[in-house]
Each structure stands twice: as structure tokens, then as C-alpha cells.
Amino acid sequence: MQRIGVFVCHCGTNIAGTVDVKAVAETLGKENGVVYATDYTYMCSASGQQLISDAIKEKNLTGVVVCSCSPRMHENTFRKCAERSGINPYMLEIANIREQDSWICRDMPTATEKAIALGKAAIAKVTLNAPLTAGETPVTKRALVIGGGIAGIQTALDIAEAGFPVDIVESKPTIGGKMAQLDKTFPTLDCAACILTPRMVECGQNENIRILSYSEVAQVKGFVGNFTVTIKRKARYVDEAKCTGCGECTGKCPQKNVPNEFNMGLDNRRAIYIPFAQAVPKVATIDPNYCMKLREGKCGVCSMVCQAKAIDYNAKDTFLEEKYGAVIVATGYNPIDLSKFDEFAYSQSKDVVSSLEFERLMNAAGPTGGTLLRPSDGKPPKTIVFVQCVGSRCSADAEKGHEYCSKICCMYTAKHAILTRDHYPDTECYVFYIDVRTPGKNFDEFYRRAVEQYGVHYIKGMVGKVTPQADGTLDVQGSDLIMDKQVHIQADMVVLAASIEADKSARPLATMLTASMDTNDFFTEAHPKLRPVESPTAGVYLSGCCQGPKDIPETVAQASAAASKVIGLLVKDKLKNNPCVAEPNEDMCNGCSQCENVCPYGAITYIEKDFRGPNRTTVTRRVAQVNPAVCQGCGACTVTCPSGAMDLKGFTNKEIMAEVDAICR
Amino acid sequence: MLQSELNKIRDEILSISGVNPRKCMCCGKCSGTCPSYDEMEYHPHEFVHMVETGDIAPLLNTKSIYKCLSCFACIERCPRQVEPAKLVEAVRMVVERQRGPQHLEAENIPEQLDSDMPQQAVVSAFRKYRK
Amino acid sequence: MNDVKHITYSYFPGCTLRNKALDLDRYARASAEALGFTLEEIPDWQCCGGTYPLAKDEIATKLSSVRALASARDAKQELVTICSACHNVIKQVNNDMRTDENVVLKVNNYLREDGISYNGETKVLHYLEVLRDVVGWDNVKAKVTHPLTGKKIGAYYGCLLLRPGKVMRMDDPENPKILEDFITAIGATLVAYSQRNECCGAYTVFEDRNIPAQRSRKILADAEEHGADMLVTACPLCRYNLIKNKGGSRLDILYFTELLAEALDVKDKVTAVMEAAYAAK
């Protein structure tokens, strides 16, 4: 026989303004099994909780019903209070008489009637509740960072600093990501490579960090604290352990016509290559799409000149299986494909370039050695037009581009213009903008410098068409909304601020991790305001642009935040599970596999089990098994189960029916 | 004209064009790409803005509505799919429907013809300037 | 490279192709026969109107297109047209009949008296789409006996073949290839230039002759500067505006079908083909 206590909260006037809380307490006090009922202004406060605590002890309560706000707010609070007071925390139910009642009902009689109904349902449920104990699973104290750009690097360094081993998986032959391709960074105009490469080196040398470059995640199994990940190590055809990074091979390779991805295809590299001089690991890689030895069996020069005997044409992809407690996604971004925006003549003229291509043209390690030259004829440009928002801020029905603002372009264009005017004061720069968005620290001051100190011409309006002329210049036709004119600028170069989008590997990775994404292929955070670095999937954390466009300061901040969350997980030896998990009744289970098929978390497996049959025989039957550590208590299996064998602890079928009956009474 | 009359006309313009001017982010790309920009007193982006704010009296009186080429460039290139050309056409239709087709008179056509002029030109002009 | 199964299309010539733009029509028909498809003229077709009525409450102006579309559907054929303007109007009206409930309702109410009901069943193709998607450029090339070698030809699309891209779905409106591939397939040298998809001025010849003059001069100048000797087009009004405003330009402006007929060496068959077509009517 239960002894239930009912506590009705006023929530100030939030509830009491619409619900007659005293009447509710009085009516519910008369319900079967209820031995105590009261009301109070703020149940969640220290004194409110003390009220509950005292009542539990004095009245020997076995179950508690709190009529208050949504369980999302304070279920945990009240459960802890119950536990402190000596009863099982799962012998407590919340009746939501705020979000589901006082906030939506217009008059007191209706609101009070509903509050009473909800209270009765909660009482009926708690009457049937059984005490539940949370289980525990161990935690593998190792983290996996997927992506070796600045986000992944920062996260790895922070986790390593806390003393935990970290693996970085990077699909390119080197870590560094997009930041390694940048020339200078806003708003400080620091040299990107100068601030990045020390971190890259640290990753390479830190004893807690293992870099798995030229590798990809192939499969993920498991759950928070206990992931098993299969990593594919692509064949490099160069032994990482032997290669010294001397570069002899790259100088001798006869295949010179491979578009160089690091320079955005503006120049070529060899079939055997080191992506850039500061690569970590500094190891050569052979591109099997272009290597003549691998494709036709000819050549072999690199292995002849390699003093370390590191070349291995027979290498194969290998697979590595490893266990991790936490997975951090840091897959980064790419600029959008500009072929759908050819009103800007990107495919028609070499001198129309994307912003990242322009970055390479400015960079000392770029295709022109740091002198800004037109890709078509190698002459210096005297007039440059920058076009903003290409592929960003497009409505969904435009069927091209993205709806969101790419965030970094206003700042990097100001940076490009400042650097151009600084290095080449005779070159005119025009920026066609819709808005100039400069929200960060020292950002707007930076943009003002571009205008006031460096004389960059900002035109409020958009470019409609770029027409390459026969003399090699580009006629840029756009609107100047402030002057109400359509202007034509004869430019030598046009730079398009291309929208940035999630890396192509993000979506398949999200599927492998069962982590949610939005329609733009950005990973969704657990809460947009309060939990920005965690995925709703436990054990998966988000770092950098994979979660949404952002600049380097924000990326590093988020990377460290993700690391701190991971460290908070890895310091634990054991994790407490949610005890409200599915449980199959093995006597009723007929082994149909329907539950296994609908479980989104892979928590259900089937086993062959022996049962006692009639006449002292043993019958072997196939029955479902739920892993309580993985099960998130979603209930999909319980409704799918045709025989009713699957039930959910804490929300059993009987309990739900009892709630319905109580409301209908 | 009274503001209330103007508001009615504005509603008619919005209804027959099917355009939602609030989608516009004031980027100016439509006017940036319009081949007739220099011939017009009011330009595509102004049509969108003025219809939204209700300042349509100037639009009803301007010759700009006849300068639109129906080239669909603004429709194709607007990143927000606002379709300014439909607004220009709607204003023109409202004007033509109110005062009757006066802009192009059949009597004036023969003197503008030459032996090579394709029927397509006459038919299109009639549809644009007399409806 | 086999012959495509011989297909017959419901053909909508449009008023101008029957009159001032005869060449565009005749050469198209003769070439079609040589390439293995037939253009069967829709009986009792009416002028499409030259320009698509943009207002949402325009109904009567769409009826001629719908009648043609219904006729094609009843003949169980796809509808082919050659004039850029007819192509633009009919495709946009067809799109309305597939997506705009209000238009479908009112149009079908109007046409009930004629016993016609239409719901967007017909597929509309431009002659160039037939060449690209049904015949295939390789097959076209194989049938070319008199390639236009050495001729430097630029494509002039104008507006109505390509835009609005979401409805025409003919090619990338900003970086089109269809006429360019055509030029290469008939053996000529392609000249690319950016103004190929900008407006010639269209019907504003009746509003202010300066407008098509300026527009056309810009297009011609761009093409000529990039080395073209000739432009090909599918629109009679574009051709008219460009020729009228040639000034000192050396460019010839031709219908693409004339070059096609020349390449396929069927120019002399034109008379026979036209007589047969008229006899069939």
C-alpha cells in the first residue's frame, strides 16, 4: 500500500494566477493512497525542497507527486531531493500543470479542472511505480578526433594536456586543414602558418597524441564511454616509419600535371608529393590516380632515388580497430562549387577566382610565390572587384546556394582588400556588398581601417554580370544603390566570396555516429544556446565549422569547450545509465526481430536461450536482449512489439493505461 | 489619389503578381543585372521596395513600366527569388486596365514596320503594352 | 551508332515561322527528316502570343498554348517547337497547368465548351533538346557530310531559351552548352563570349528604338571582339534586332537550322519536304 505525498507548486503567479492551487491540493488529498497534500509558492527552491524532504520523513511517504512546471525543468531537482530524503528517486512523478495547463488555459475553472486531472494521472502512475536503480558502464579513457584542422588540433591538444590519449584521424596526407591554406588571419593579420604550424608540430610530438593521417573512419559501433571504431588507413605507398620527408622523390617525379589541391588547382604538383613544406607528418604520398608506376607499371624513379628505401608500390589499404570513450567531430568546411553562379563568369575567365584561390595567390607559399598576379597572363592586377555573398543568403526556392550567411566572408574580404592595398597601393579595390557583418572583437574597427586608412571602395549593391572582354579585362556590371546607378567597373580580377558548406564526409559520418544534422549538413548541437559543443547523441562532441560556419577565434574557443566536455567524461571511471530502459519479457518474446529493426541506437540484439519446457525438456528459443547502457528509453520497440513482450521500465504499459484511466474518470 | 485607393491598388498588384516583397534583402542584384537600367526612372529594386512600403503613386505614373524587356534576368539571378519583373508587369497591367490600353495604338504600327519585322515583335508588343 | 527509332513530334511552328522566319522552319523540317524524326504540324494551332503573361489572373492569353498542348497529348506525342518565344510561352504555361490550381481550374472551365481538359501531361521540347537528348550529338556529327570547318561561330541564346531556368530546364542559364555543342557537332569552331545570354531588346523596338540598338550593339561587339564571324540563334526577333543594329559589324546572324541543313546537306531537299508537309495538311 503506497503512502503518496502531493505537492502543488504556485510557481509564483505562473501557475497560481490561473490555477486554484489550494483547491487542487485539497481535491488530490482525497485520492486513494494519498496521505499528505499541500501547496507552496516555489517548490523548486531550497525551502520548497525542504518541505518535501520533511514530509517524506515525517509521513513515511513511499511515493511523491509534484504538480509543477515541465519535468524538463526540474525532474532532476526533485529526484535528487527524494533520494536525499531516503526514497528511490524513481518513485516520484511530475504533473505538468504549467506548460500543459496554466500557460494555455484561459479561465480558472478549466485550468483547475485540468490540473486536478493531471494530478490524478500522476498519482495513478506513481502508485504502480517500482524503484529503479541506474546501472553503470566503464569508460575507455581515450578520445578520437575526426578531422585535423585547427579545430581538431586544438581539441586534441587540450585533451592530451589533461593526460588522456587522443587519436586524430585526418583524410588528407597532413593535418592543418583550411587554416594552413590561409595567408593572414583577421583581425590581427597574423600569418596563419606561423601561428598554426607550432600547434601542428606539438601534435606531432605530443606523446599523448597519435596522428592517423591519410585515414578515414569506416565504421563506428558502441555507445558513450565504449565506442569501437574501425579506421581505414589509405595506402600511401610510402612507409611512414621510414620516410624522412627529404623531398628527393617529389623533385624527380616525371608526372608533373597533377592539379595541386593545396593551391586550389592554380598550379600543379607531382604524383608523389608532400602537400606543403610544413606538413605534419612530413611524409610523401603517392597519388594512385596519376602515378605511372601504379597505373601502367612504368617509371619507378622515386623508389630509385629514395635513400630511406621508403617506397612500397605494393602497399594496400589497412584497417585499424580501436576503442574510445568519446568521439569529437571536427570535419570542417569547403567553399561551395561556383559553377552554378556563372553570371560572374567564374568558368569563363581565369581571372575570376574564389576567395580561397585569392588567398593562395597572396600567399608566399602559393602558386605565384606571394606576388599577386593574374592567373591568365601573370600581370599584376590594377583594379580588383570583390563580390560578396556568392551562394550565401539564398532563399530555399532559389534551388542553388545556401540560406545561411557564411559569417566569415565580410571579414576576410576586408582583409583581402587591406592586404592588397598595403602591398600594392596603386591597385584599386572595390567591394560590392549587401551588408557588412563584423560582430567580433576588433572586427568593425578592422573594417573601418579598410575604408578609412586603406581607401577600399565599398559599394552597397550587387554585381549582376561579369563579362570578360577580349583585351583580358573584366567588365563588372553592378548596382550602386546609394547613388541609384548601374555601374560598370573595368576590373583585372574579380574575387567571389564563396559560401562555405559542410565537408562531404560529414553526412556519412553522422549516419555512422547516429548524430543528428540539419538540412545544411551541419551537425546539430544538443541545445543551440546552452549546449553548443555536444551532439544530442551521448559521447559525440562537436568542434569547429562542422557545427556551423565560424571564424578561427570561435573555432578555437569551441574546440577547447568540446575538449573540456570530453575531459569531464574521461575522468569518470564509470558512467551512470538511464534506468528507464526497455526490458523484454522473455516468456512472451517470440523472436520476431521487429524491435531490433526499429531501435535507432542499436541497443537490441537477439540471443538463443534455453528455457524449461514441458515434461522436463529444455526448449531453445530466440529472444530479444536490451543493452541498458545503449538504450535511451525512446519506446519505439515497445510499440512495435506485436506480442507486448517489450516494456519500458519507468513507463510501463500498465502505468500509462493507469494514467489514461485516471484522466478519463 | 487617396491613400486608401492606393492601398487597394497595392493589394491588387501583390495579388496579380504573386510576389512577396518581404523576401527581398535589398541586395540590388536585380538592378545590377537589368539591361534596361539606364532607360528606367524607377528600377527593379525600387519597384519591390516601393510596393512594399505602399509608395506606389510614382510607379503608376512612370514610363519605366514600358522599358522592361521581360528578359527574366532579374528573376533568374535574384538570390531570394523575389521576381521583380512580375511586380513591374503587375504595375503595368493595373495601369493599363484602369485607363484602357493607350500606350500602343494599332494605327501607329504600320509606320514602324519594315519588311523584315517578325510577327513575333508585333504580337509581343501588343501583349505587353495593351493589356 | 544506330538510328533512333523514328519519332514523330507534334510540332508548333508559331506565327513567325510561317511567315517572316520561313527559313527557321523549312530547314528544321528537312534536317529532322535527315536525322530520323518527323515534325508533324499541330492542326489549327494558334499564335502563342509571343511573350508569357506574368500576371496570375491571366487566363485567356494562355488558352492557345493549352490547346496546342492538349492536341499533342491526344496524338500521344511530345510537343516540339523551334521559335525561342513559343518555347518560352508554352513551357511556362505547361508549368502553370502542372502547378497552379487556380489556373488549371479556370483554363479547364473555359475549354470545357471545346471538350478539352488538360492537366500538364504533355512534355515540351525545343528542337535543340531533341538534338541533344534524343538524337545525341554523336549521331548528329556522324550524319554531317558538309562540316562547317573553319567557320568561327558564336551561339546567341537570348533570354527565352534559357530563363527562367527552373521552368525551361533546358540548360544552365548562366553557362549554357547546348548551342555550343551544336556548333561543335556541325564541325565549326566555337567562339565563346559572355553576352550570349543577355537580352537583344525584344519588343521595345516599338517603345524606343534606342533600346534594342544599344543592347544589340553590346552583344555584337562582345562576340566580334572574341573572334566570331557568325552568330546562330533560334529567335526571329533576336535575329531581327541584331541585323537591324549591325552597324559596321562583320557578323552574319543565321538561324541554327539553316546551318544544320547545310551541314547535313539537305538544303536542296527543302522544297520537297515543304510540299509534302503542306500536302499532308
Image (spheres, coloured by chain):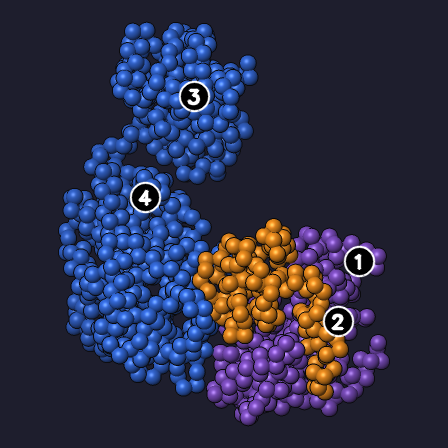
Chain colours: A blue, B orange, C purple
Q: Amino acid at mark 1?
A: Leu
- Mark-to-mark CA distance, 4 and 3: 35 Å
Please tell me whether mark 4 or mark 1 is closer to you in this view: 1
> In this picture, is A190 found above or below C6?
above
Find residue A359 and report its horizontal and vertical position in percent: 29, 69
Q: Say whether marks 4 and 1 touch (CB < 8 Å).
A: no
Find residue A555 and report its horizontal and vertical position in percent: 27, 52
User: Residue beneath label 1, please?
Assistant: C111
Q: Same chain for marks 2 and 1?
A: yes
Q: Amino acid at mark 4?
A: Pro
Q: Can residue C254 be seen by looking at this rendering?
A: yes
User: Residue beneath label 2, please?
Assistant: C47
Q: Say whether marks 3 and 1 touch (CB < 8 Å).
A: no
> In this picture, is A654 found above or below A307?
above
Q: The numbered mark 1 sits on a residue in which chain?
A: C
- Mark-to-mark CA distance, 2 and 4: 61 Å
Q: Same chain for marks 4 and 1?
A: no
Disc 2: CA contacts within 10 A as few (<14), some (14-19) or many (>=20): some
- Mark-to-mark CA distance, 3 and 2: 71 Å
Q: Amino acid at mark 2?
A: Cys
> Considering the numbered disc 2 on the image, is that residue within a helix, a strand or a loop?
loop
Q: Can residue A228 be seen by looking at this rendering?
A: no
Q: The numbered mark 3 sits on a residue in which chain?
A: A
